[in-house]
Image (cartoon, rainbow, N blue to C red):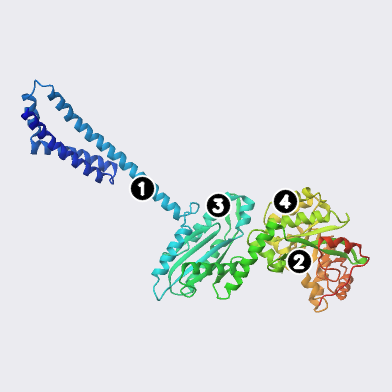
Amino acid sequence: MQSVDDGLVGFRAPMHKISRLTRRAGNRLASLRPATRDAIVISFFGIICFASEYFFDLAPRLFEFSLNYRDWEIDNLIFVVFIMSFGFAIFSYRRVRELAIEMKARRDAESDARKLARHDPLTGLPNRRFFVEALGEALRSTAHDSRTAVLMLDLDGFKSVNDAYGHGVGDQTLAEFAQRVLAIVRAGAILTRIGGDEFAIIVPSIKSLDDPAALARRIVAAVAEPFVIGQISRSVGVGIGIAMSPSDGTDPEILVQRADRALYRAKAEGRSCIRFFERDMDAHVERRILIETELRAAVAAKAIIPYYQPVVAFAGRRVVGFEALARWKSDKLGWVSPDLFIKVAEEIGLISELGDQLLRQACLDARTWPSELTLAFNISAVQLSDPTIGMRVLAILAETGFNPLRLELEITETALVDNMKIAQEITGRLRRAGVRIALDDFGTGYATLSQLLSLKLDRIKIDRSFVDRLGKDKESTTIIRAVLGLAGGFNLETTAEGIESEEQLASLTADGCLEGQGYLFSEAVAASDVHSLLESHKLTTKAVA
């Protein structure tokens, strides 16, 4: 029996060593390619078999053991165990491979998760989280004789693209914008998308202010080319605000805040403008932020309401209609100029909602007036760029029950030039429904006569800038006479704006103008005061200094 035990011990010792070597090898195999692992494992088992034979005389021992105990059933068992050990080794190898695949899949998933957490899936650019980390690192590593620039970018007119053509076209526009800018930024600079249509660029190791300025100009030039998505071609602009470290701050949060404020100023100055941060921007932007906040609340609460300025026929000074003018009194800001809040509403994407609110309320108010009175309503350039504006106007008319024949939409000459094709489609559809179209601020834009006549207008409104200079220079009188002659030749009605004195009224009447509006007749009044104004036997005449 002792000899049997000795034989088993002699067998177990090499198997233990083989098992230990197998485990160690499995750990190292996990990081190798599958083909490499297979080759190594096969070679390794060959080496183990050779080493077992060479160092431990495994085959002779097994043979001897089998001869000595051939009458025992245990020799069969030993043979089975020996064979099973090789099976177990193969199973272990297979399991190692499975574990390696699982570990690789897990590492890939973790890598993808980290990438998604730091990158924008639409454009493939780094996101806000990456931007914050990269900016902090750039500021820490900036040499004492160089500077780091932060450029904040915001697309002009992107919301109208989204509203008009859907988010699919909007997403493709953002992706193409990212590729255009990515092709411009120099090596070492980092372009990121921080949200919506907002992007940011970190430019380290700057020696001169000309570097970020030149980059910004190249971006504006690249974006100026139309974005062609399928059959759609649209142009957008880009506002750029720039802040420099260390002059504008060394803290990442402060630097980004100041670049944002420069961007606010750039967007306030118009389409595709570039501005560096200046110290006085803090107060300006704080007021702008307050205006935006209050404006959003006012639109949500429908606190901006239409006032009505009468349009008067000069013969008998008879009221023939009213023009709706937006008015807003804020609890914090007091009366806010329409020139200011309308522009802000356009910039932050609220103009369509605000315009629809005002038109809906104006139509409801006008339904209470005598049926012969017309309602004039202004459409901004941003609204006109939206192909759905015509459908929305007709929907509001149907909703309120207001007669389309009593509505006159005023469109500026500049808006027509910027959106001529869309303007033709929209005005054509509205005119077929009975809505009249007036050209507002005539003479202040750059439209050609052929462009204007292609719209089939119903009225031309003479801009107040020409009326204001009547009697002060001959040029204004000449221009007004030319406009009146043009309107008469094409059978268009005319209305003069901004009449504030009897002298201006007399001059316009002498030149053949039949209608007008201005403080001479009445300022814009609330809806509750319209009826009392109509009931008065004679409009109060007053001149404003």
Which residue is tagged 4? Answer: 392
Q: Which amino acid does label 3 sit on?
A: Asp
Query: Which corner quadrant of the image does residue 477 belong to?
Result: bottom right
Which residue is tagged 1? Answer: 107
Task: Count every numbered label the image shows and give the total.
Answer: 4
Local crowd at mark 4 within 10 Å, few (<14), some, or many (≥20)?
Answer: few
Cα–Cα gap, marks 4 and 1:
52 Å
Percent coordinates x, y for residue 507 in the rendering: 87, 73
Q: Quadrant of the N terminus?
A: top left
Q: Residue at x 37, y 47 (%)?
A: 108
Callout 4 touching callout 2 (CB < 8 Å): no
Q: Can residue 343 be seen in this view?
A: yes
Percent coordinates x, y for residue 270 in the rendering: 63, 67
Query: Element at badge 2?
Result: strand
Local crowd at mark 2 within 10 Å, few (<14), some, or many (≥20)?
Answer: many
Q: Which residue is drawn at 72% across and 55% down?
A: 356
Question: In the image, 215: left or right of 429?
Answer: left
First of labels 1, 2 by sequence position: 1
Cα–Cα gap, marks 4 and 3:
24 Å
Which residue is tagged 2? Answer: 441
Q: What residue type is labelled 1?
A: Arg
Which residue is tagged 3? Answer: 171
Q: What residue type is labelled 2?
A: Asp
Query: Element at badge 1?
Result: helix
Cα–Cα gap, marks 3 and 1:
30 Å
